[in-house]
Image: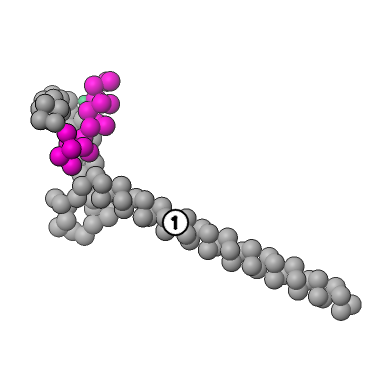
Amino acid sequence: MTDCCIIRDLLPLCDDDAISEESRKIIEEHLENCSECRAYYQGIHRIPHTFHQEGDRGSYRYSDVARALRHRAILTHAAEAAMLAVSAFCIIKTAANTKETDKSK
Ligand SMILES: [Zn+2]
């Protein structure tokens, strides 16, 4: 199982050609003999469908997927910050209106 964990960690590097030929051979031999890691490897190739148009599937790189995930996280945080700012503005405005209403009584 430890071998499987190591192999799965190295698969994205293998896809990006950022791995030695010796390591690539070890990975390829492992994939030939391990159906679970083969299924995992096929699974990580489905990820690009989430981020790319149909037809780009063969051109993705792990770094592209990581960049897309970071971009998505930044957009999510920006939307959360905007919602928080609007909520804070509404609370402050409501509090100010309440104060003015209390003063006029
Ligand atoms: Zn395996």
Determine which residue is flagged by label 1.
76
Is 96 placed left or right of 30 in the picture? Answer: right
Which amino acid type is marked by label 1?
A: Thr
Extreme-top residue of the structure: 2
User: Where 69 sits versus 17, above or below?
Assistant: below
- Residue 47, given in percent of the width and then of the height, sits at 26, 47
User: Where 38 sits versus 83, above or below?
Assistant: above
- Which stretch appears magenta? 1-19
Q: Mark 1, residues whose alpha carbon is within 10 Å: few (<14), some, or many (≥20)? A: few
Residue 95 visible in rendering = yes
- Given residues 6 and 32, the one toward you in this image is 6
Tell me which corner region of the image, top left, top right, bottom left or bottom right, holds residue 17.
top left
- Name the residue located 76 percent from the left edge and 74 percent from the top edge: 97
Say how the picture is coloured: one colour
- Name the residue located 24 percent from the left edge and 21 percent from the top edge: 3
- Name the residue located 47 percent from the left edge and 59 percent from the top edge: 78
* 10 magenta-colored: yes
